[in-house]
Image (cartoon, helix red, strand yellow):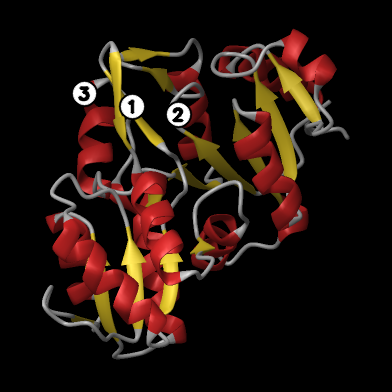
Amino acid sequence: MQLPYTTYLIDLDGVVYRGETLVPGAKEFIAWLNTTHKKYLFLTNNSFASETQVLAKLTRLGISTDQTHILGAGQAAVKNIARRFPGATVYVIGEQPLIEMVQQHGLQVASLDAHKADVVLVGLDRTFDYKKLTGAVLAVRKGAAFITINRDPLLPVENSYLPGCGTMTAAIEAGSQSKPEMIGKPEPTLLFEAMQQLNSQPGETVMIGDNLGVDILAGHAAGTHTILVLSGNDTRESLARATVKPNHVYENLAAIMDLIHTAEPTSHTS
């Protein structure tokens, strides 16, 4: 089978790399996307690392790409807010890269003492405190749109975990008694923003991920094709038990490259 897609949305951790190690086939697959002029974006749910930081890691690991091929859920959230609430005042729970991103999109950042805003945007904030919680809760209770980048309760760090974006979101949700809108996977908004950026339609797009309940579920919700690679979170055993099923399953990106190389000799006669 050849790959009939024009557009590739690619998860990072568990697909392209694991920690500081490239997954087999990753460098070759990205080189193929570049040389065949495919449309692609790396998608990450990360709510605090900027696209510049993601690019620095990819470059360090030997992946040849650029920042135009990276879309984080934080950037997608800010783009979504700027389009829906142009010029809005945003109460930001987040770190400096997220604050700067909000400002760069023509939005106003509310003072932490303000208890009113058009939008409350929640990302990972390692200085989250009672003052910020109060401001966010009161702003939502007064009618602000409540948007969170993701609902991951924990942030994996070396040999441990830290409270994630979802933990802060849950605190604001409890105080405001309002349910947030989520931008990151498994909700489809990140994929919709990616396809809009690439001028692509779901029928020509494939989501490649390692997590059935996050990446593949997001692909289903957005109406794209889906490929599960077994180089990260899920295994053939968990796939057999799961109700969420991908369109195709491969061991890793190297297995996809094997398929591409096998199909190439006959690609001009089909």
Q: Amino acid at mark 2?
A: Ala
**Distance in Å between CA atoms under marks 3 and 2:** 16 Å
Q: The residue tagged with tag 2: helix, strand or loop? A: helix
Q: Is residue 165 left or right of residue 237?
A: left
Q: Amino acid at mark 1?
A: Ile
Front-lying residue, 258 or 186? 186
N-terminal of the two: label 1 or label 2? 2
Quadrant of the rendered structure where residue 195 is? bottom right
**Distance in Å between CA atoms under marks 1 and 3:** 7 Å
Which residue corresponds to mark 2? Answer: 31
Quadrant of the rendered structure where residue 269 is? top right
Local crowd at mark 2 within 10 Å, few (<14), some, or many (≥20)? some
Q: Quadrant of the C terminus?
A: top right
Q: Amino acid at mark 3?
A: Arg
Which residue is at a point 61% across and 38% down the rendered structure image? Answer: 215
Which residue corresponds to mark 1? Answer: 63
Q: The residue tagged with tag 1: helix, strand or loop? A: loop
Q: The residue tagged with tag 3: helix, strand or loop? A: helix
Which residue corresponds to mark 3? Answer: 60
Q: Is residue 94 left or right of residue 167?
A: left
Front-lying residue, 267 or 185? 185
The answer to whether 149 is drawn above or below residue 16 in the figure is below
Quadrant of the rendered structure where residue 251 is? top right
Q: Is residue 229 left or right of residue 153?
A: right
| Residue 68: percent from left, percent from top | 35, 53
